[in-house]
Image (spheres, helix red, strand yellow):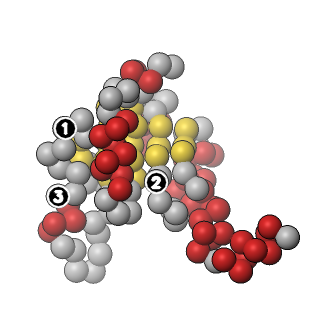
Amino acid sequence: MKTSETKVLIYDQGILGVALGQALAKDFKTIYYFKPWMSAFPKPHEQWIGKGIPGITRVDSYEDIKAEILADDGIFFFPDVGDGDKQSELRRAGGRVFGAGDSGELEMNRNLFKEVLK
């Protein structure tokens, strides 16, 4: 599949995914951007991150777009550590996933990382 025909969903925890999305938009068909905004006391500005950025389509629900990306053989891009469970689920479903997966624990637990290196 050509990149020009491929859809990408960026599942971001911060704001770095916006700049990555802009760079990817040059080569990919569609760039969807999702940043979790749900919490006990959601802040309205969290839903604005990624909106109005040329080349990026902000989505407010990961679940609403997941089936489309899987059906179109798109790419799920997780630029941050964490969400290994989501990445594993997508891989089991046949999804193409770019992300740290379960190795995020090595990033956050340096003692474990040193043990693995030994």
Disc 2 or 1, which lies upstream in sequence?
Answer: 1
Q: Nearer the viewer, residue 49 or 38?
A: 49
| Residue drawn at 22 percent across, 57 percent down | 49
Quarter occupied by the C terminus: bottom right
Residue underneath mark 3: 48
Q: Which mark is residue 54?
A: 1
* Residue 62 visible in this rendered orientation of the protein: no
Going 54% across and 43% down the picture, which residue do you hit?
97
The quarter of the displayed image where residue 104 is located: bottom right
Q: Is residue 50 left or right of residue 7?
A: left
Q: Secondary structure at mark 2?
A: loop
| Residue under the image location 75 percent in, 74 percent down | 114
Percent coordinates x, y for residue 60 in the rendering: 25, 54
Left-right relation of 90 to 32: right
Please say if 111 is above or below 9.
below
In the image, which is nearer the foreground, mark 3 or mark 1? Answer: 1
Dot 1: element: loop
Please determine whether, in this image, residue 40 is positioned above or below residue 72. below
Sequence order check, earlier mark of 3 and 1: 3
